[in-house]
Amino acid sequence: MSSFLDYIHEVFEPFGPVTTRPMFGGHSIFHDGLTFALVDEDILYLKADAKSIHLFEDKNLPRFTFEMKGKLGSMNYYQAPDEMFEDPENALYWATIAFEAALRAKAKKKPKKKPSPKKGI
C-alpha cells in the first residue's frame, strides 16, 4: 500500500473505517461495502451525483477522466478539495457527501430478479 493510501485512511478517520481495493491502476475506497471514492496517481476523487455535483463544480474541481482504447472517458467522481485534507470536520463533510451519492446510486439500481420457481403439473 502506498503512503498516500495510508494517509487516506487517516483523512477518513472522522468518517469511519474505509477499505481500499486495487482498480485499473488506481484504488477504490469503500465504506460499508460501497465505493464512494477513488485514488488515481495519488489524487483522491469523491463520488458525485445530480444532487451534489454543483458542490464540486462551484469549486472548479476536475472530474475523474481516464483513457481506454484511445478514447477519453469519465466517471461521476471529482477531485477532493484541498480543505478536506486540512481539517477533520471538512473531511467528514466531504466524505458524507460522497457516501450519500453512493447510497443514492445504489438505491437507483434495480434489484436482480430471481428466477421464478418452476411449478410442477
Image: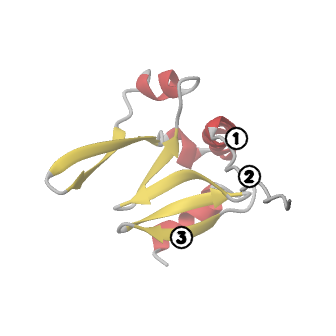
The answer to which of marks 2 and 3 sits earlier in the sequence is: 2
The answer to which of marks 1 and 2 sits earlier in the sequence is: 2
The answer to which of marks 1 and 3 sits earlier in the sequence is: 3
State whether residue 48 is above or below residue 87.
Answer: above
Q: Camera-side residue: 116 or 103?
A: 116
- Which residue is tagged 3? 21
- Which residue is tagged 1? 89
State whether residue 75 is above or below residue 121.
Answer: above
Query: Type of residue at label 2?
Result: Pro
Mark 1 or 3: the one toward you: 3
State whether residue 49 is above or below residue 18.
Answer: above
**Is the residue under label 3 in contact with that under label 1 (CB below 8 Å)?**
no
Q: Which residue is depicted at the point 55% across and 65% down?
A: 7
- Which residue is tagged 2? 14
Q: Quadrant of residue 105?
A: top right
Q: Camera-side residue: 82 or 74?
A: 74
